[in-house]
Image: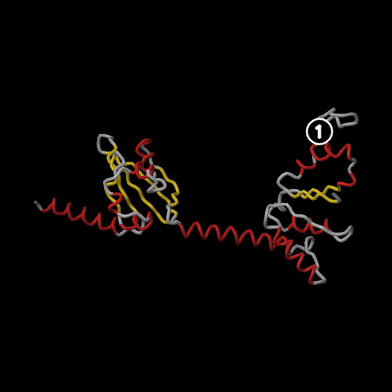
């Protein structure tokens, strides 16, 4: 072997050492989707063993449920790069980018896949979203126009409960005698919720709506639906409160 060829061999060995030591996972398939190489990082990210994947068809492993997904089969079919997030079975999420490699004649010979562990990034993003939600809730709860002053331990407990309830999108039953401030508490819950910034708070005094008009007031009506109806029709109060808060008072 002449010196030039020896240099090429050494360069190839160095290149593979670099790939082997990469923090990102790397694996190669041939044009048929058979795995011909993978580095140690890929094994750690995917949770697979080398002897279980080398020489095997990647699509067969997906169909057998051994791996959740891969980009390689689609890249082989479409002949263009593809990126997707894959959630492996042992709890690791990875950003996978697969790229087709062609020979001089334009024939597909390999698919190179780079696999980056983004588990911590996703977890941090989720935590940031939760902290942002709590911050918005705290800001809304501290506004002067929504602040409720509790002068007793019982009322303080109610306000704290209302603040917690506001973080959930679910029906809330407020009970109490007339005049104790049920409407204020309902408004407070709305103002502390995630929908208060751009969604309406619609209060309906059910006792003030005649039984004969209850359906049309709640659900609306088309023009000319009944005698005395508006010629333009009317949007129902339920539709008006869509995605916001509907407070049914005096049920």
User: Residue 157 location in percent, x, y?
Assistant: 76, 68
Q: Is residue 156 above or below residue 14?
A: below
Label total for image? 1
Q: Is residue 17 above or below residue 57?
A: below
Colour scheme in use:
secondary structure
Name the residue furthest left.
1
Q: Residues within 10 Å of mark 1 (few under 14, many from 20)?
A: some
Name the residue furthest top.
224
User: Residue 34 location in percent, x, y?
Assistant: 29, 43
Q: Which residue is mark 1?
A: 221
Report which quarter residue 214 is drawn in: top right
State left or right for residue 6 relative to residue 64: left
Residue located at (44% from left, 54% from top): 93
Residue located at (83% from left, 37% from top): 215
Helix, strand or loop at mark 1: strand
User: Residue 65 location in percent, x, y?
Assistant: 39, 46
Residue located at (35% from left, 48% from top): 113
| Camera-nearest residue between 17 and 27 | 27
User: Residue 147 location in percent, x, y?
Assistant: 78, 64
């Amino acid at each position: 072997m002449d010196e030039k060829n020896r240099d090429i061999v050494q360069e190839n060995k160095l290149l593979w050492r670099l790939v082997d030591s990469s923090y990102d996972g790397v694996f190669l398939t041939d044009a048929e989707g058979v795995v011909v190489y993978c580095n140690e990082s890929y094994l750690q990210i995917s949770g697979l063993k080398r002897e279980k994947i080398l020489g095997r068809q990647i699509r067969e492993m997906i169909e057998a449920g051994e791996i959740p997904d891969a980009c390689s089969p689609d890249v082989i079919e479409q002949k263009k790069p593809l990126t997707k997030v894959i959630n492996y079975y042992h709890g690791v999420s990875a950003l996978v980018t697969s790229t087709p490699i062609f020979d001089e004649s334009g024939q597909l010979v390999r698919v190179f896949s780079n696999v980056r562990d983004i588990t911590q990034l996703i977890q941090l993003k989720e935590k940031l979203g939760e902290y942002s939600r709590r911050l918005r809730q705290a800001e809304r709860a501290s506004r002067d126009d929504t602040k409720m002053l509790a002068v007793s331990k019982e009322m303080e407990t109610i306000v704290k409960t209302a603040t917690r309830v506001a973080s959930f999108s679910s029906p809330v039953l407020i009970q109490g005698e007339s005049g104790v401030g049920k409407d204020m508490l309902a408004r407070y819950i709305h103002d502390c919720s995630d929908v208060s910034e751009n969604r309406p708070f619609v209060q309906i005094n059910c006792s003030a709506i005649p039984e004969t008009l209850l359906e049309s007031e709640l659900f609306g009506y088309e023009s000319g639906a009944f005698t005395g109806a508006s010629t333009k029709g009317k949007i129902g109060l339920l539709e008006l409160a869509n995605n916001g808060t509907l407070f049914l008072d005096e049920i």
